[in-house]
Image (cartoon, rainbow, N blue to C red):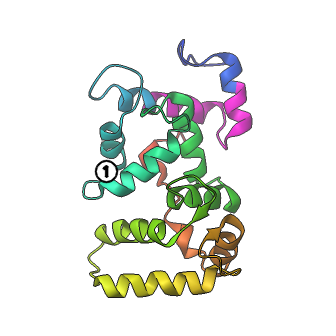
């Protein structure tokens, strides 16, 4: 390996990350540098907490969206993002990520309780938080109507839940649902 990561990331880890993600060695080195900068921006602990994550993404007015994206990155659920979780999470959001990768990532944002389904309340919470990021203002009734319409279209077996497969079919019809899940390359500062 040309560069040095640190004692946190072994040569075996680099090989594993190259196989598991869409990043090459140079990109991994750049991401490691970004991780180090972000994880030590408040406390020098080589872990990213939710506040550091929020600042890195530049999100200010939606605790809910930050929390949801953070929890998808935080695969082990310990309340922090380590370097491997950071790199794997960014891989799902990179321009090189496949449609399926992005779809799985977005589904996990909606699936709050990680039961493999999206219920109306989960959809409502993410939808409402997403609207808070825009200038669009809808009444409670309008939002509930949109949730009902979404379920009418997506819940093909009418069980009151949207499965991953049902979600996938809906996103195929409306691919703009995952368009915002591609990070600007400048945010993660990948080498050219």
Magenta segment, principal secondary structure?
A: helix
Residue 16 pos. (x, y %): 71, 29
Residue 64 pos. (x, y %): 35, 56
For the N terminus, the quadrant is top right
For the C terminus, the quadrant is top right
**Could you tell me which residue is drawn at 68 percent across and 70 percent down?**
168
Nearest the camera: 28 or 174?
A: 174
Q: How crowded is mark 1: few (under 14 residues within 10 Å), some or many (20 or more)?
A: few
Span highlighted in magenta in the image: 15-34
Q: Mark 1 points at which residue?
A: 58
Give the secondary structure at mark 1.
loop
Q: In this view, does 62 lie to the left or right of 96?
A: left
Q: Is residue 53 left or right of residue 32?
A: left
Residue 109 pos. (x, y %): 51, 57
Q: In this view, does 138 lie to the left or right of 75?
A: left
Residue 100 pos. (x, y %): 70, 60
**Could you tell me which residue is drawn at 71 percent across and 80 percent down?**
157
In the displayed structure, 177 sits above or below 76; it is: below
In the displayed structure, 155 sits above or below 9; it is: below
Asked if residue 56 is among those painted magenta in the image, a careful observer would answer no
In the displayed structure, 7 sits above or below 50; it is: above
């Amino acid at each position: 390996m040309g560069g040095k990561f640190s004692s946190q990331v072994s040569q075996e880890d680099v090989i594993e990350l190259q196989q598991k993600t869409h990043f090459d060695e140079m990109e991994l080195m750049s991401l490691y540098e970004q991780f180090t900068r972000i994880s030590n921006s408040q406390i020098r602990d080589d872990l990213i907490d939710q506040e550091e994550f929020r600042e890195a993404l530049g999100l200010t007015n939606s605790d809910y969206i930050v929390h949801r994206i953070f929890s998808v990155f935080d695969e082990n659920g310990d309340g922090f993002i380590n370097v491997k979780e950071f790199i794997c999470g960014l891989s799902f959001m990179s321009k090189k990520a496949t449609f399926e990768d992005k779809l799985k990532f977005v589904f996990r944002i909606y699936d709050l309780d990680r039961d493999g389904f999206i219920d109306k309340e989960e959809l409502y919470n993410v939808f409402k938080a997403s609207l808070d990021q825009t200038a669009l203002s809808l009444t409670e009734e309008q939002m509930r109507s949109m949730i009902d319409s979404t379920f009418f279209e997506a819940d093909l077996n009418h069980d009151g839940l949207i499965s991953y497969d049902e979600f996938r079919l809906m996103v195929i019809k409306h691919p703009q649902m995952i368009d915002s899940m591609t990070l600007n390359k400048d945010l993660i500062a990948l080498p050219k």
